[in-house]
Image: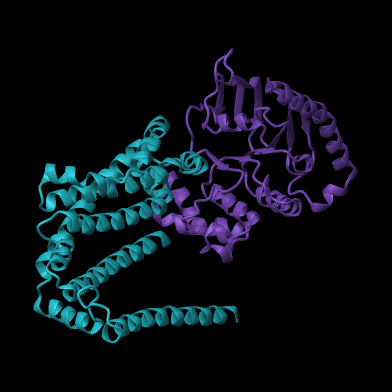
Amino acid sequence: MKTGDVAIRVRDVSHQFGEPGEAQFVQALQHTSLDITRGELLCLIGPSGCGKSTLLNMIGGLLTPTTGTVEVGGKPVRAPLPRDIAFVFQENALFPWCTIIENVKLGMVFQGVPKAEQEPRARKALEAVGLKDFMGHYPAQLSGGMRQRAALARALSLETGTLLMDEPFGALDEQTRMILGEDLSVLLSTTEKTIVFVTHSLGEAVFLADRVAVFSARPGRIKEIIEVDEPHPRKPSFVTTEKFSRLRNTLYELLHEEIRKAIEQAATASPHP
Amino acid sequence: MSARQDRRDKIASRAVQIGFVVALIGLWYFGTAYWGISRILLPNPVNVWHELKDVIGSGEFLPDLRVTLTELAVAFAISCTAGVTLGYLISRSPYLIKVFEPLLAGFYSVPIILFLPLYVLFFGLGPGSKIALGTTISFFPIVLNTIAGFGYVEKIFITAARSMGASDFQMFRYVLLPAALPVMLTGLRIGFTVALLSILGSETIASLEGLGHRIVHLAEAMETARMFAYIAFAVVIAATLNSIVSSLERRAKRR
């Protein structure tokens, strides 16, 4: 948050699946507005089904909002903007028939990077995430954590201003997650990227984010935004500070009641006849 | 250590397999040479070997082999083209998959060889009816596996490629095709095998030429030793073709 200008502007977006009155009707997100500052890391956190992934997909142009608008760099988003926005998905978004370096290069092929630049850029990105020695491996030969590093390298090699991460460490065990989070904080502190990061983990949100947006239960809207005023890269010892615990506890209190609500909703949404 | 163990296990099981075949031929030899099995019902393996040398040496097999292989090539070419094209088109729409996949799977389970008399009425006793039958039978595994290959590509691959800006052509060339290829190739191999089987089979039932026809012709003339020689020849041809197709499949899948 150095410059303070707005990179992503979300204005009054709603999203619904199906039409009101239909059995499948779901109001995923309701009248949400949000400004994301250039260079900041914003975490979205909330109960399952609150629409945080929906919002991420709308920012990335993979979903069109039912109402409202999304602007990235002043341009309205209507379709994916591969030159401005890169994604890291939850898991297994690497193509299993390509080696790790081929996966990274294929992203650049899609984005339209000149052929001569692809190889050096792919190598650089893979070195940055610590996969220099695994470029010729296939995804199935790597652990889940390494696959997510590769997916991150693919996104970094695209050199976009914005990075959208949809629970990128969601399928990993707690310890792998912790290490990847620390490495990510170091890696991203050297870039100027704007990052939106969806997570379920309170600790991950506090550790990585400049700001954390807490969502309410469905119909989702942003309940509160918490500031984490701590310089990047975050040190592993940040986790043991009193400030970290205080922020984590604040998030817990905000979320706890929403998660209960979400679970009750899920129970009443499918009543047994 | 375990690789060596594997190797030894492999050699041991190969030895048992070879021993089994040798024992079978030995039984065949003794049964016909010493134990009085009629030579018309079961010829002596030595006679069969001489006949086989004569069949191959004289080149007598060539016209029949050419007919059978031509029928196979034409039938497989048609069923590949039709099966892959239709399968791909159906796979583009979830609705079409829902309608046509069960329908085609239903047709696949029909024993189409029962329609051979009809095919002979429509297309005559010549290669036409064999080609039509081979095409029909091999079409179903090809079209079904093409649908399965292209229709069930994991959504996340498509979403990821789209987010990185893949064009329609790039999506096909770098995502859909490699994702679908293994399943589709299995369909092509099954299609090839059933086409060969049904063509050889239908030649033995109603035909004027071809390897299957030659075998039945020799049986009716009581020339069983020569018939066995032709059967052995046909088995070798079929096994060779099938292993070529299998190794092509394996090589393409490895990429």
Could you say which quadrant of the image residue B3 lies in?
A: bottom right
Q: Which chain is cyan?
A: B
Please report the residue visible at 40 percent of the width from the left and 36 percent of the height from the top: B102
Residue B75 place in picture, x, y as percent: 20, 51
Image coords of residue B192 (percent x, y): 29, 56
The location of residue A12, given as percent across then percent down, is 62, 18
Identify the image's colour scheme: rainbow, by chain, secondary structure or one colour.
by chain
Q: Which chain is purple?
A: A
Residue A12 seen by the camera: no
Image height check: is A117 above or below A203?
Answer: below
Q: Looking at the picture, does residue A165 appear above or below residue B74?
A: above
Number of callouts in the render? 0
Is B17 placed above or below B161 here?
Answer: below
Please name the residue shown 83% across and 48% down the image.
A238
Query: Going by the picture, which residue comes out furthest to the bottom?
Result: B34
Q: Residue at x 20, y 82 (%)?
A: B47
Residue A159 left/right relative to B254:
right
Q: Nearer the viewer, residue A245 or B150?
A: B150
Looking at the image, residue A6 sits to the left or right of residue B155; the answer is right
The one of A212 and B67 positioned closer to us in this rendering: B67
Residue at the outermost top position = A21
Residue A7 against residue B105 in the figure, above or below: above
Residue A38 appears in the picture as rendered = yes
- The quadrant of the picture occupied by the N terminus of chain B is bottom right
- Of all residues, the one furthest to the front in this rendering is B36
Say which of B193 and A172 sits in front. Answer: B193
- Residue B255 image offset from top left, x and y in percent: 41, 60
